[in-house]
Amino acid sequence: MGGFCPSGGMRTAIFVPLFLLCASLSAATEVEMASDHNTALAPSLLGAKNACNAPSRAPTNDDIFSVADARIVSLIPQVGNATADLPNASVVWSWSADFPKEARFPILDDDRCPEGEIRYFAPSAPSLAGELSYSYGNSNETIALSSDGKNPAPLGLGAGKLSEADFLQPFARLSLALNASISVDYSFSKSSHSYGCTSINGYVACGCERNYAQGIRTFARNVSDARNFSVEVGPNSLLWLNPPLSSRLSGAENGKMVLFARRLPADISLVFRGREIASVRPYSFSTMAGPCGQAVVERVFSPSGRGSTEASIRRGGPIFPSQLVEKDASYIPFYLEFPWRAEAGKANFTVICEDAFQGRQNFSREFYVREPEPFSPSSGATGGKGAMEKREASDHETAAAYPARAPQGAFPDFSIMALAFAFPLAIGAAALCRHLEWL
């Protein structure tokens, strides 16, 4: 491929225009704002009565909880159901417990006796103990969870944990599972009646006897949750379709390229000779509230441009372009086309791709732009008509588009060359005859 240079061979542009340095740090500000919101929200999700609006139930003598809930709420950062390995992702989790301050339940130990009662009061603060386990690439990790544990909890999503099989799909997979137990201690008093009989002096007396007990009882409820996420891990590669070579003619032209992406682009800027000539944002982003009050960001493929010149872009399905990229992997292709005009001279073209997670990658390429040379038939040895000059076709000659034959001239004169060879032969013959006369 004459014009292709994979990501490993692409040179990072040293010169970055001032307007790029002054631009927003994130092409998707919604993602950055959602991350800040969820980070601030996270501590309040631990131990709340019902942080995520879980369904409640009536407490019973066997289960005092009206709400006992634990969840994997969100990743930071997150778009849709995906995150990236670059910004040190973390997970927001929650646990909730709600129960009455005092509860009374009837007790009937024997149908022959009056009903008793158990009373629960003075509950302790609830507590949680458990773990969050996650599988990523060839790694399995476990994070200990406690009532006041870290939230958000950091995850280790380094590229060194991935195997070759993780690149067969466009994104790596992250699986999380939360398992824990929520408990609370109650003081209780129990009043009940039991039926019994006694024998006194041969007489048997039966009746109900009142019993009383008090103490501490611990209620516990097991909770769990599990979720799967996608992780954008790269690499991205760029393939130029037009111009395919390192030079082009001056004037207006449509540039064409394919971005093989494993980090979905949120903004693509095309800078020629230090000036942005085209830009496009492939996705639009929207934010909504989740069940735990977290900010949820969704993206929809809805291309839009900015500035005076817009680039058109379309997205394809997953492909495996093993001969066009540096690393064998499955990619999402983005096809870009944009108009641009160049005058003669050396020029640098930089494509700046920014993903939704503040990851930025530059692809740089140098072009030599030259003026087109008009065609003019050559003259000289062929006379007045050049070798490439078109001529009229006929029934006895080749098509008019083929080069014309050189015109026939006089047959070359070889007489001088013949004399040069004949003169030494004549001298040799005369010498031979003189020698024979002496014999």
Image (spheres, grey):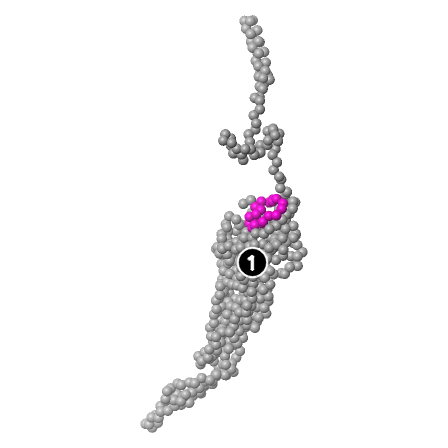
**Does 89 appear above or below 109?**
above
Residue 124 lies, in percent from the top left, at 52, 79
Residue 116: x and y in percent read 42, 87
Mark 1 lies on residue: 303
Picture quadrant of residue 207: bottom left
Question: What residue is drawn where x is 49% and y is 65%?
Answer: 227
**Location of residue 73 with respect to 206 vertically, above or below:** above
The secondary structure type at the circle numbered 1 is: strand
Number of numbered markers = 1
Q: Main secondary structure of the magenta part?
A: strand
- List x then y, in percent, for residue 368: 63, 44
Which residues lie in the magenta part?
237-257
55 magenta-colored: no
Question: In this orientation, which residue lies closer to the viewer: 7 or 247?
Answer: 247
Q: Residue furthest top?
A: 438
Judged from this view, the residue extending furthest toward the left is 202
Position of residue 92 relative to residue 279, above or below, is: below
Q: Is residue 89 visible?
A: no
Q: Residues within 10 Å of mark 1 (few under 14, many from 20)?
A: some
Q: Is residue 244 magenta?
A: yes
Q: Residue at x 52, y 55 (%)?
A: 315
Disc 1 marks a residue whose amino acid type is Pro
